[in-house]
């Protein structure tokens, strides 16, 4: 007898398991057990993690945020029923691809904003009012949401945006015209701004 | 804190598949795997922090396999399936079909004990909880299972058993 684990590992097993995991994601979706579906897509600003609840897109995360840590946080804050299930993200992935290809200026996706609360969520809800290719300062956004003194809080709201790219916090700059902080790093912010300036 | 279920599948999916194959043969193993992980996903948010995740999954697989065996025995004259994939048990130089027949011919308890100890690597104390008996009974069932496999499977003696 030689029924040790190592002897079972094979390429055929890996293929079988990949198929079974796909089937599990489909069954979980059909049974209403897929609380969070995720996938990763390539982009000019590096690999992006996309995660969605049944309500909509809940998280877009840059590589520098560490996708494993982001998934851990989603499991902790929303639900541990998290599976890689690209299908639910098909539309989001396609719209992002169109955006990075210069063929889309506005995202038309259901969003789940449950990761932000209060003033931060209020600010993030207003960000899409800054149109493609335009920019505002943190102070202007503070005025936009009816709280002109809350410049720092607007900065925090932008820095903690759980849906970067789709909710355009990259269009908010410092008063001196420099880009300011960005969740995906300053280079990613510049890439998005120049893409939209073309 | 509960980690994402995807990580549970990644870490334990292979072991559970191999356990299901030993319990049921390759043909029914995939359905048992799917039902095991779907049931696990359903119950996952309530799994206690202290639980041994692999033992928990094997326990679910054990119940799902019993359901399959019962359904199978209600069918007229079931024929034991021989796996089609030649790598399913992967004993180098061995005759897989012979080993599968030998595993399938074991009494249920012995086959279960062999799967949970030699494939899943669970300690006998955990296996006793799953099988409902004493630790000694679980150890004996695994030992008897290996002994029977040695007797019925040619070439098994050459390979040697892991204790």
Image (tube, rainbow, N blue to C red):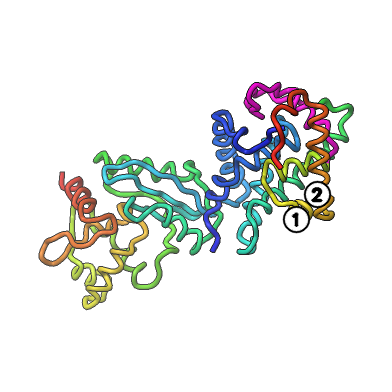
What residue would you read off at disc 2? B138
Magenta segment boundaries in residue numbering:
B81-108
Nearer-the-camera pick, B101 or A115: B101
In the rendered structure, are the residues bearing label 2 and label 1 in contact, judged by CB atoms less than 8 Å apart? yes
Quarter assignment of residue A151: bottom left
Residue B147 at x, y percent in the picture: 81, 35
Indicate left or right for A40 with A127 as reference.
right
Q: Give me the chain letter of mark 1.
A: B
Residue at point 71% right, 27% down? B158
- Could you say where residue A137 lies in the image, as x and y percent from the top left? 17, 65
Describe residue A198's horizontal placement relative to residue A161 as left or right: left
Mark 1, other Cα within 10 Å: few <14 / some 14–19 / many ≥20 = some
Q: Quadrant of residue B84?
A: top right
Q: Nearer the viewer, residue B108 or B150?
A: B150
Q: Name the residue: 46% across, 48% down.
A: A38
User: Residue B125 shows which numbered tag?
Assistant: 1
Task: Indicate whether B141 appears above or below A186.
Answer: above
Q: Helix or strand or loop: what does disc 2 sit on?
A: helix
Residue A79: in magenta span: no
Q: Read off the chain for label 2.
A: B
Relative to B35, say whether B106 is above or below.
above
Q: CA distance from mark 2 to mark 1?
A: 8 Å
- Percent from the top left, x then y, of residue A67? 40, 52
Location of residue B152 in the rendering, given as x and y in whole percent from the top left corner: 82, 27
Q: Secondary structure at mark 1?
A: helix
């Amino acid at each position: 007898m030689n029924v040790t684990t190592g002897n079972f590992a094979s390429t055929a097993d890996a293929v079988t398991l990949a198929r079974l995991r796909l089937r599990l994601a489909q069954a979980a979706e059909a049974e209403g057990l897929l609380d969070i579906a995720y996938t990763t897509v390539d982009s000019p600003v590096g690999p992006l993690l996309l995660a969605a609840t049944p309500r909509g897109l809940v998280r877009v995360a840059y590589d520098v945020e560490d996708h494993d840590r982001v998934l851990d946080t989603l499991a902790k804050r929303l639900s541990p029923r998290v599976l890689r299930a690209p299908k639910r993200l098909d539309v989001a992935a396609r719209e992002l691809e169109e955006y990075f290809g210069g063929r889309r200026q506005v995202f038309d996706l259901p969003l789940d904003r449950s990761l932000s609360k209060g003033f931060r969520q209020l600010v993030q809800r207003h960000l899409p009012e800054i149109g493609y290719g335009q920019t505002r300062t943190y102070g202007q956004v503070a005025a936009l949401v009816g709280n002109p003194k809350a410049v720092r809080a607007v900065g925090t709201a932008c820095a903690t945006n759980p849906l970067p790219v789709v909710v355009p916090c990259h269009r908010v700059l410092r008063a001196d015209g420099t880009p300011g902080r960005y969740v995906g790093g300053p280079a990613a912010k510049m890439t998005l701004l120049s893409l939209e300036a073309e | 804190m509960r980690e994402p279920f995807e990580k549970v599948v990644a870490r334990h999916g292979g072991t559970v598949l191999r356990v299901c194959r030993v319990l049921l043969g390759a043909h029914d193993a995939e359905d048992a795997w799917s039902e095991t992980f779907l049931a696990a996903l359903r119950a996952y948010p309530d799994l206690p922090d202290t639980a041994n995740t692999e033992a928990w999954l094997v326990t679910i697989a054990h119940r799902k396999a019993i359901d399959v065996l019962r359904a199978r025995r209600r069918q007229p004259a079931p024929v034991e399936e021989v796996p089609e994939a030649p790598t399913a048990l992967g004993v180098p130089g061995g005759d897989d079909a012979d080993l599968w027949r030998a595993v399938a011919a074991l009494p249920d308890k012995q086959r279960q004990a062999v799967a949970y100890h030699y494939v899943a690597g669970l300690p006998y104390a955990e296996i006793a909880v799953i099988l409902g008996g004493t630790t000694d009974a679980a150890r004996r069932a695994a030992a008897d299972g290996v002994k029977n496999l040695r007797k019925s499977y040619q070439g098994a003696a050459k390979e040697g058993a892991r204790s």
